[in-house]
Amino acid sequence: MIRPALAGDAPAIAQIWNAAIRDTTITFNPDEKSVDEVAKLTKQACLVWEDEDRVLGFARYFQFRGGAGYRYTAEHTIMLHADARGQGAGRKLMDAICVDAKNAGMHTLFAGCSAENPGAVRFHVALGFQTVATLPEVGFKFGRWIDLVLMQKHL
């Protein structure tokens, strides 16, 4: 089931997010998220995938860049617990976040995918995103430079 995130979901969201921070290059940020930090984010545009009372994924969107000129453009984050991958939860979360963003007045949604995660690029292409740029060596994690694939979808 997909539903709006609640502050009580913060521990589960933080666990999913922090596993990605610790173990992967899907996010370039090396700093783990605190439960309090995540709880604040749940008050913004954030949805969760819940199965049998267990949060197994989340998706959120936020303004792409600062300033009023970007107020109709958003970037998103989507992450799933390892137990939820390959079951369609990601597609359902993305479909829901796209509808939510459009209903909130967003015109364009961006994804920033690590070039080391070709599955994320394929996933976004399947959802109608197009690659608009590859930014070479803009991320640095685990002692190496990583390219960022910037993808866009008009809602």
Image (cartoon, rainbow, N blue to C red):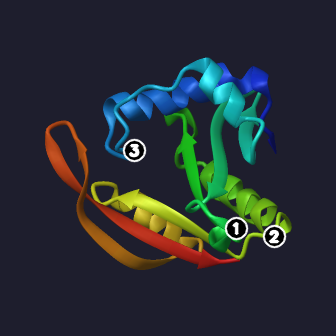
Horizontal side of 22 relative to 63 (left or right) equals left
Using the rendered image of the protein, determine whether residue 1 is visible from the camera's viewpoint. Answer: no
Q: Is residue 106 above or below residue 58?
A: below
For the residue pair 146 and 119, the one nearer the viewer reads as 146
Disc 2 residue type? Gly
- Mark 2: give few (<14), some (14-19) or many (20+) Cα within 10 Å: few
* Residue that numbered label 3 is attached to: 27
**Residue at 56% from the left image edge and 50% from the top image edge:** 77
Q: Please give the label number shown on residue 71.
A: 1
Q: Is residue 155 above or below residue 76?
A: below
For the residue pair 66 and 17, the one nearer the viewer reads as 66
**Residue at 71% from the left image edge and 76% from the top image edge:** 107
Residue 55, image x, y percentages: 69, 30
* Residue that numbered label 2 is attached to: 105
Secondary structure state at the residue bearing disc 1: loop
Secondary structure state at the residue bearing disc 2: loop
Which image quarter is the C terminus in?
Answer: bottom right
Residue 104, image x, y percentages: 83, 63
Which residue, as the protein is rendered here, is positioned at the far front?
Answer: 67
Q: Residue 146 lies in what quarter of the image? A: bottom left
Which image quarter is the N terminus in?
Answer: top right
Disc 3 residue type? Thr
Q: Earlier in the sequence, mark 1 or mark 3?
A: 3
Asked if disc 1 and disc 2 are in contact, CB closer than 8 Å, the reply is: yes
**Residue at 68% from the left image edge and 68% from the top image edge:** 68
Secondary structure state at the residue bearing disc 3: loop
Disc 1 residue type? Arg
